[in-house]
Image: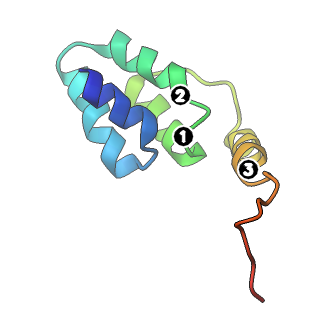
């Protein structure tokens, strides 16, 4: 279980995390799936959050647009480092 948890908590692509979460649900480990999801929900892209809340049956009061805004602030608004260059 530890490698699966590490993988889904470090990989944000839906096509990779869905089968693992689905396997948890299929093996009656929904509580564990929700626990894993809650630990890293802010890491996942808003689309993945939306899909996982549906898959896991989690009620979310947050609007999808707010998820996108929060994700953008966290992952796109970081200052550039010295190794980052933009060429126009």
Among the two numbered marks 3 and 2 on one chain, the one whose residue lies closer to the N terminus: 2
Are the residues tagged 2 and 1 within 8 Å (C-beta)? yes
The structure residue drawn at horizontal position 69% and vertical position 40%, both measured from the top left corner, is 67
The disc, 3 or 1, on the residue closer to the chain's N-terminal end is 1
**Mark identifier at residue 72:** 3
Q: Secondary structure at mark 2?
A: helix
Quarter of the C terminus within the rendering: bottom right
Q: Front-most of 22 and 44?
A: 44
The image quadrant that residue 29 belongs to is top left
Nearer the observer, 18 or 8: 8
Residue assigned mark 1: 44
Residue 19 versus residue 54: which sits nearer the camera? 19
Q: Residues within 10 Å of mark 1 (few under 14, many from 20)?
A: many
Q: Is residue 79 left or right of residue 22?
A: right
Q: Which residue is mark 2?
A: 40
Q: Position of residue 25 (x, y in %)?
A: 26, 22
Q: How does the figure colour the protein chain or chains?
A: rainbow
């Amino acid at each position: 279980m530890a490698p699966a948890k590490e993988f889904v908590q470090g990989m944000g692509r839906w096509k990779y995390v869905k089968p693992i979460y689905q396997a948890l649900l299929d093996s009656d480990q929904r509580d564990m799936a929700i626990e894993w999801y809650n630990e890293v929900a802010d890491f996942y892209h808003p689309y993945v959050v939306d899909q996982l809340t549906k898959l896991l049956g989690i009620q979310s009061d947050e609007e999808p647009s707010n998820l996108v805004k929060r994700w953008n602030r966290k992952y796109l608004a970081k200052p550039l480092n010295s190794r980052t260059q933009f060429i126009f």
